[in-house]
Amino acid sequence: MSQFDYLSLATLSDNFQNLNAFSVFDPSNVRVYRQALYDSVLYPTAGGLAFALFSVPKGQGAGVTGTTAPGAVAGTAKTIDDTNMQLAGQMPTGLMQLVTSIELEFIPGSVSTANTYTPQTPYSFVAVPTAQVPISAGAVNDFNAVTQSGVVTLVINQITVVQENGLFRFPCRNRRGMGEAALASNSATTSSLAMASPYADGDPYDLPAPIRIAPNVAFGLTVSYNAVVATPTGFNGRLRAWLNGLQFQNV
């Protein structure tokens, strides 16, 4: 006789808690911790009409969809520095995200090599005449061009839950601080100094109510433009996004 013959299907139907005993995950035993979902994509100097975030998980991607981590081999798969997504566009079984706020950041770069992001230099000093705009000053121009437009859209289960115009609407709580520098030149006329580390400022984009991303439900965040916005410096940049909040993990 099967062990299941001892169970009353009617009893199990009436008492859902009995069914939990046969589940791989125990819904009553959930680990809750503070954790953001994050992702990064390359912003090529030529720009683009749409950039999809949270669509390529860690360990995947190549070429333009590959890593933007500083020091990584260009065009290779994404690393934990790029994203903590385990699956493409969805949470895995047993893991749920409760989103409380959204942060976006455009970080100017310093090279135009295909599929490559290299950080720009916040401080630059040129002691001889040059026609090139210092990288740090050019970074401000790139930041201004890219972040003043762009429609940011968060879609969960084919439902648009957030849509705002302008990347600067999603400032980061934690910003890269400006340091101090002392530079000198023996020329009174030919040297140039530039110091810049641009970032969006203002109130964080806190959601009026948390938004749940359930396991195995499709979601994604896109940054789209009516027309391509090229970076004035001719260098690639990096787009980063965070869906801040709490993660719930069945144990």
Image: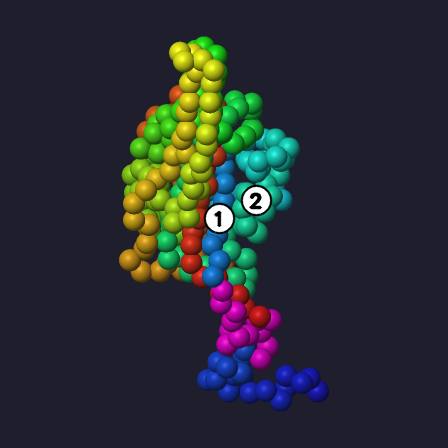
Query: Reading the chain from its start, which is encountered first: label 2 or label 1?
Result: 1
Residue 73 position, x and y percent, is: 64, 33
Magenta stretch, residue numbers: 21-33
Q: Nearer the viewer, residue 109 or 227?
A: 109
Residue that mark 2 sits on: 81
Q: Quadrant of residue 92?
A: bottom right
Q: Quadrant of the N terminus?
A: bottom right
Q: Nearer the viewer, residue 248 or 181?
A: 181
- Left or right: 51 as drawn, with respect to 3: left
Q: Magenta span: helix, strand or loop, mainly?
A: loop
Image disc number at residue 38: 1
Q: Nearer the viewer, residue 17 or 132?
A: 132
Residue 27 position, x and y percent, is: 51, 73
Residue drawn where x is 33% and y is 50% of the image:
204
Q: Is residue 29 magenta?
A: yes
Most extreme residue toward the front is 186
Residue drawn where x is 29% and y is 58% of the image:
208
- Give the residue type that dot 1 points to: Tyr
Residue 46 visible (yes or no): no
Most extreme residue toward the right is 1
- Give the residue type that dot 2 points to: Asp
